[in-house]
């Protein structure tokens, strides 16, 4: 069965520090999709990125970057020069054939606290 | 463009009662998915609807049900409420079926408290 592990329950950093959120996944399928979502205190999940299993290129979007490594089944998320507004819970998620590609299996989330 | 709306935002019920939650997807979106979020279990998939048909269902008891209307609005119902049903219920919409191929937009959720 598919599984997503976010080993870091909570991370605290000071503004302007770089921070990496880890995500390790398990799936038996060769075609799958990986996602990152942000959940601010308001509760609404905000989509950050979707990556398919055939695209191992790293991606950068502003202060955000993602490192996808199939060899270690990891899809880590780095925030450069963190800001207070980055404080939120971040979820990594997986969708694969086992789930019919129509559902998301989420990790438990990592709470990021950025202090001024 | 209006986002996903969920009503009500907060709800308090007692054990044994039933509850209906509503979700209005983004205009033009035809797929609606529901998730339950609890501190212990995290985010868990409930079901997905597309064109008024349930396409996929998570591992929840039959007390949890849902439907989708012709305008893509969706409702979920929980009967015979239990204390463990206390959770944040999130609705997500996307353009098409196989929602994971498409970006899912989430609503703010309905916070259900069962006393």
Image (spheres, coloured by chain):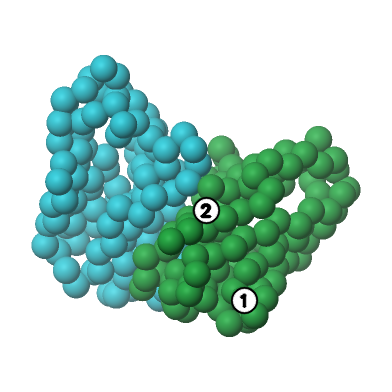
Chain colours: A cyan, B green
* Farthest right residue in view: B16
Nearer to us in this view, A53 or B49: B49
- With respect to residue A86, does B64 lie above or below? below
Q: Quadrant location of the N terminus of chain A?
A: bottom left
Q: Please state the chain letter of the residue tagged with numbered disc 1 in the rendered image.
A: B
The part of the image, by quadrant, that contains residue B57 is bottom right
The part of the image, by quadrant, that contains residue B94 is bottom left
Q: Residue at x 67, y 76 (%)?
A: B69
Q: Residue at x 32, y 70 (%)?
A: A32
Q: Residues within 10 Å of mark 1 (few under 14, many from 20)?
A: some
How far across and down, in percent of the image, does residue B13 sit? 81, 42
* Farthest front residue in view: B1
Secondary structure of the residue carrying numbered label 2: loop
Secondary structure of the residue carrying numbered label 1: loop
The dot on residue B37 is: none
**Residue under circle 1?**
B71
Q: Residues within 10 Å of mark 2 (few under 14, many from 20)?
A: many
Q: Please state the chain letter of the residue tagged with numbered disc 2 in the rendered image.
A: B
How far across and down, in percent of the image, does residue A54 sit? 19, 72
- With respect to residue B88, does B104 lie above or below? below
Q: Quadrant location of the C terminus of chain A?
A: top left
Q: Is residue B44 visible?
A: no
Nearer to us in this view, A82 or B28: B28
Mark positioned earlier in the residue sequence (1 or 2): 1
Are the numbered discs 1 and 2 placed on the same chain, yes or no?
A: yes
């Amino acid at each position: 069965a598919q599984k997503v592990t976010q080993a870091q329950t909570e991370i605290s950093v000071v503004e302007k520090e770089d921070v990496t959120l880890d995500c390790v996944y398990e799936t038996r399928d060769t075609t799958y999709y990986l996602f990152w979502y942000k959940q601010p205190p308001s509760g609404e999940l905000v989509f950050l990125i979707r990556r398919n299993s055939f695209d191992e290129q790293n991606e950068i979007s502003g202060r955000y970057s993602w490192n996808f490594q199939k060899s270690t089944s990891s899809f880590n998320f780095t925030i450069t020069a963190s800001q207070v507004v980055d404080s939120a819970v971040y979820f990594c998620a997986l969708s694969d054939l086992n789930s019919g590609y129509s559902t998301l299996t989420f990790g438990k989330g990592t709470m990021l606290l950025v202090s001024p | 463009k209006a986002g996903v709306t969920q009503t009500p935002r907060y709800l308090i019920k007692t054990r044994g009662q039933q509850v209906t939650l509503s979700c209005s997807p983004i205009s033009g979106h035809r797929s609606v998915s529901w998730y339950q979020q609890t501190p212990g279990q995290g985010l868990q998939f409930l079901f997905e609807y597309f064109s008024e048909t349930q396409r996929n269902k998570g591992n929840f008891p039959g007390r949890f049900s849902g439907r989708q209307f012709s305008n893509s609005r969706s409702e979920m119902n929980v009967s015979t409420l239990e204390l463990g049903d206390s959770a944040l219920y999130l609705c997500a919409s996307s353009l098409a079926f196989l929602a994971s191929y498409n970006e899912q937009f989430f609503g703010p959720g309905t916070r259900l408290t069962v006393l």
